[in-house]
């Protein structure tokens, strides 16, 4: 039996629940799944025992509760966590039963996240990062295997502590590939962005770029789907939309579940990843890129290393943070001929390389190697 634990993701998180847990239960494993979220869903089934805790439960008490539950289950062989703050649980587990295999899933480069989002002055910020590293280092000796979700993250930091490190990206499942080329001759300018809505993602740049796009294609529209990171930025985007006269051309939708987003993606023609250049976007792979490739969207991307790592001449590039460059790329994606060729090239990349089925085998091997 396996225990999977998260302290900050939604219970039905795409990577944790829809991919990793589903892969495990279809192989015959029973999963004890613990979450800490205000989205109080019960995802229990014949092969899953799910228990959700309120996000108001502090981490220390959450870890103690999980430890008491897990140690009362004699057949737990593997424990996988999804946040750095849960590492102290591994120390408790290993001190009681060293044969349990511990797996640490590092979703994102935490240093890049902190450098991007922290408002502290640089010296204080770097001191905080150093303290975090020291705290993490204390517990890495209790980690048997580490999963990295992004190739740009250096393996060396984790390898120096002797654990097994694997890169397992959050690629889409093959079942979501749009099988036939969809001709959007009547709908070449239906544009979509979905993901976090924050300044680091270039959402304000995208909204401003829509002015030139609409001047060129009056029928153009933009759909933004996701959760705003701050109320201040939400107010800024709504102000921009009104100030630029885009109220009839830009709509904003709340976050949509993993199972429902695919049908919405398919009714659009252009997907945009408008990220500005910062520590986060220079390190972390945008999962949405592969989803857009799967459903056959023409794709406009900021020219950043993690994206270049996967695609080259099958997307339309824009300079990060540059409104004019982004608007030109979107206009070119709408007006250029030969889109069928690049769309099919992207889908072929998904079929051959960037799919969950390829990574699922690698993920399951972590539980079959003992």
Image (spheres, rainbow, N blue to C red):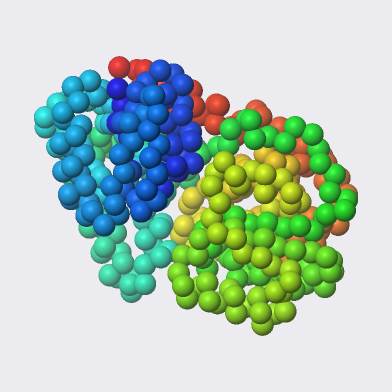
Q: What residue appears at the point 72 percent right and 79 percent down from the top-left corner?
A: 245
Q: What is the quadrant of the C terminus in the image?
A: top left
> Residue 14: horizontal and vertical position, in percent?
49, 41
As drawn, 352 above or below 112: above
Of residues 344 and 49, the one nearer the viewer is 49
Asked whether residue 321 appears in the rendered view, the answer is: no
- Total labels: the figure holds 0
Of residues 240 and 331, the one nearer the viewer is 240
Q: What residue appears at the point 43 percent right and 64 percent down from the top-left corner?
A: 116
> Residue 298: horizontal and vertical position, in percent?
75, 49
In which quarter of the view is residue 42 placed? top left
Looking at the image, residue 272 sits to the left or right of residue 86; the answer is: right
Q: What is the quadrant of the N terminus in the image?
A: top left
Looking at the image, residue 333 sits to the left or right of residue 155; the answer is: right
Asked whether residue 308 appears in the rendered view, the answer is: yes
As drawn, 46 above or below 16: above
> Residue 304: horizontal and vertical position, in percent?
59, 55
Q: Residue furthest left?
A: 96
Of residues 136 and 23, the one nearer the viewer is 23
In which quarter of the view is residue 273 placed? bottom right
> Residue 340: horizontal and vertical position, in percent?
83, 41
Of residues 124 and 226, the one nearer the viewer is 226
Looking at the image, residue 320 sits to the left or right of residue 48; the answer is: right
Q: What residue appears at the point 26 percent right and 57 percent down from the top-left corner?
A: 56
Q: What residue appears at the point 25 percent right and 64 percent down from the top-left corner?
A: 127
């Amino acid at each position: 039996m396996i225990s999977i634990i998260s302290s900050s993701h939604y219970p039905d998180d795409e990577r944790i629940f829809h991919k990793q847990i589903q892969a495990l239960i279809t192989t015959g494993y029973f999963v004890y799944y613990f979450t800490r979220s205000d989205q109080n869903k019960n995802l229990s089934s014949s092969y899953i025992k799910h228990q959700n805790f309120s996000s108001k439960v502090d981490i220390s008490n959450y870890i103690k509760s999980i430890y008491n539950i897990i140690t009362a289950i004699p057949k737990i062989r593997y424990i996988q966590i999804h946040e750095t703050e849960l590492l102290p649980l591994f120390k408790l587990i290993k001190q009681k039963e060293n044969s349990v295999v511990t797996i640490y899933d590092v979703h994102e480069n935490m240093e890049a996240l902190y450098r991007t989002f922290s408002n502290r002055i640089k010296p204080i910020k770097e001191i905080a990062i150093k303290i975090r590293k020291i705290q993490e280092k204390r517990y890495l000796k209790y980690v048997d295997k580490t999963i990295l979700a992004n190739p740009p993250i250096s393996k060396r930091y984790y390898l120096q502590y002797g654990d097994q490190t694997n890169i397992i990206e959050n690629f889409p499942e093959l079942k979501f590939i749009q099988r036939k080329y969809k001709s959007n001759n009547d709908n070449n300018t239906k544009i979509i962005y979905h993901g976090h809505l924050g300044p680091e993602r270039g959402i304000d740049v995208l909204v401003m770029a829509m002015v030139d796009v609409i001047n060129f294609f009056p029928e153009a529209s933009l759909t933004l789907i996701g959760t705003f990171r701050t109320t201040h930025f939400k107010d800024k985007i709504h102000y921009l939309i009104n100030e630029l006269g885009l109220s009839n051309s830009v709509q904003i939708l709340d976050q949509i579940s993993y199972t429902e987003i695919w049908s919405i993606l398919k009714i659009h023609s252009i997907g945009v990843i408008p990220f500005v250049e910062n520590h986060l976007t220079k390190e972390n792979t945008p999962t949405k890129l592969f989803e857009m490739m799967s459903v056959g969207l023409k794709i406009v991307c900021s020219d950043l290393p993690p994206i270049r790592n996967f695609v080259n001449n099958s997307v339309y590039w824009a300079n990060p943070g540059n409104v004019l460059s982004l608007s030109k790329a979107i206009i070119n994606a709408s007006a250029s001929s030969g889109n069928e060729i690049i769309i099919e090239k992207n889908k072929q990349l998904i079929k051959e390389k960037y799919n969950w089925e390829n990574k699922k085998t690698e993920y399951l091997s972590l539980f079959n190697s003992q």
